[in-house]
Amino acid sequence: MIDYFKTIFSATSATCQGLWITLKYMFKPSITVQYPTEKLVPYEKFRGALLFDAETCISCNLCVKACPSVCIALENATVPDPKNPALKKKVAKVDWYSIDFGKCNFCRLCEESCPTKPKSVWHSLDYELVFFNRDEMVRCWKAGFSFIGKYWDRKTKEFKAPAGQISIHEVAPRR
């Protein structure tokens, strides 16, 4: 008989607890974001789209070596050798840099291995990447390109800016 009343009491107590939580949140204002015109800004450690700054890169290849999915490629810039103009000498600048987002697993090892301050490769807070074909997944950066990068269109044989990508921040924060 005592077990019967214990069961009734615990069930009533659990029901009242659940109703109290519901009642408490019922009178709070709702938090609704009018997506896609408004977007939530993720937390600081969020790993969004990779961005690159060709001006700060010293072409050390540490990000290429640190990448477990082999999705980063770069080529050093060269200048003619003053002693022998037929030869080219590598300089500490990058000629081009590319990331294949189809292979990238957003592990952040490339950002952690970058020795420059501020980082030349970093994860932005953008969580929407738009790709309409396979070519757009491979982003390339050269001097003068924006942080978002451009993709090589094989049909027209030229670099194009990705269409439909909306940044959360105008200037992406670097860590």
Image (cartoon, helix red, strand yellow):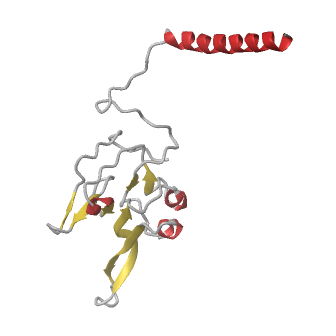
Q: Is residue 38 above or below residue 137?
A: above
Residue 14: x and y in percent read: 68, 15
Q: Quadrant of residue 54?
A: bottom left
Q: Quadrant of residue 21?
A: top right
Residue 41 locus on image (x, y percent): 42, 35
Residue 153 shown left or right of residue 129 in the figure: left
Give the answer, above or below, for where 135 lies relative to 162.
below
Look at 37% across and 63% down and name the residue there.
100
Image point (53%, 66%), residue name: 66
**Residue 75 image-quadrant placement:** bottom left
Q: Is residue 140 above or below residue 78?
A: above
Task: Tell which of 96 and 104 is nearer to you.
Answer: 104
**The one of 63 and 153 positioned closer to us in this rendering:** 153
Residue at image point 25% right, 54% down: 132
Estimate the x, y position of residue 121 in percent, counting from the top left: 43, 57
Q: Is residue 31 left or right of residue 24?
A: left
Q: Position of residue 114 (x, y in %)?
A: 51, 61
